[in-house]
Image (spheres, grey):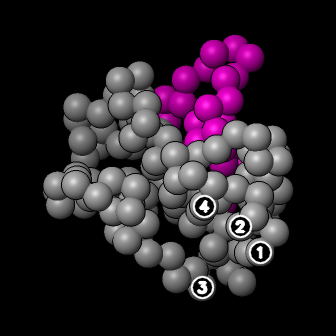
Amino acid sequence: MSENDSKFEFTETYRKLQPGTERSIISFREATHKKVRKELPKSTIKIVDLARLAFEIPTASGRAIVWLEEIVKEKDAQFSLEHDRNEARIIATILLADMIASGFTGTPALVLTGSFVGRRQTVDQEVIGPHEVVQG
């Protein structure tokens, strides 16, 4: 399956994780999702960054994921990776789920590894955990 065949439903997925969110914020997040999603197939480093964020895996150097914060701030100037950590994890989790749904090579293995085979969870309570990777 190519990345263009994905039938991923961003709004539905986001609202399950953030049910009371204002529509304007959902629109901001969807715009971020679309922009980042286009960039991901070109950069495995960014996909790894998202997995680290989604599973709360610190980097050895403590390197921040500045590129993601910059993209989110294009629509939501108040966003901060430091202060909105859970929201950043939701964004990362949804992006990884989309990559898996589109059949992007390597993402399922990365998620399986990032979850430490189910010992770590994302904010979606394992929707992108090992069981989806095996079934997907």
Residue position for label 3: 5
Q: Is residue 4 left or right of residue 105?
A: left
Kindly report the distance in space between the C-alpha atoms of the residues bearing marks 4 and 1.
11 Å
Residue position for label 4: 127
Foreground mark, 3 or 1, reads 1
Q: Position of residue 45 (x, y in %)?
A: 70, 41
Q: Is residue 48 left or right of residue 106?
A: left
Per the rendered image, the range of residues in magenta is 39-67
Q: Amino acid at mark 1?
A: Gln
Q: Position of residue 120 (x, y in %)?
A: 70, 40
Circles 1, 2 touching at the beta carbon (< 8 Å) = yes
Along the viewing direction, whichever of 112 and 51 lies nearer the viewer: 112
Using the image, tell me which numbered label, if any, was put on residue 135: 1
Crowd band around label 1 with a 10 angstrom C-alpha radius: few (<14), some (14–19), many (20+) = few
Kindly report the distance in space between the C-alpha atoms of the residues bearing marks 4 and 3.
20 Å
Q: Amino acid at mark 2?
A: Glu
Crowd band around label 4 with a 10 angstrom C-alpha radius: few (<14), some (14–19), many (20+) = some
Q: Residue at x 33, y 62 (%)?
A: 15
Residue position for label 2: 132
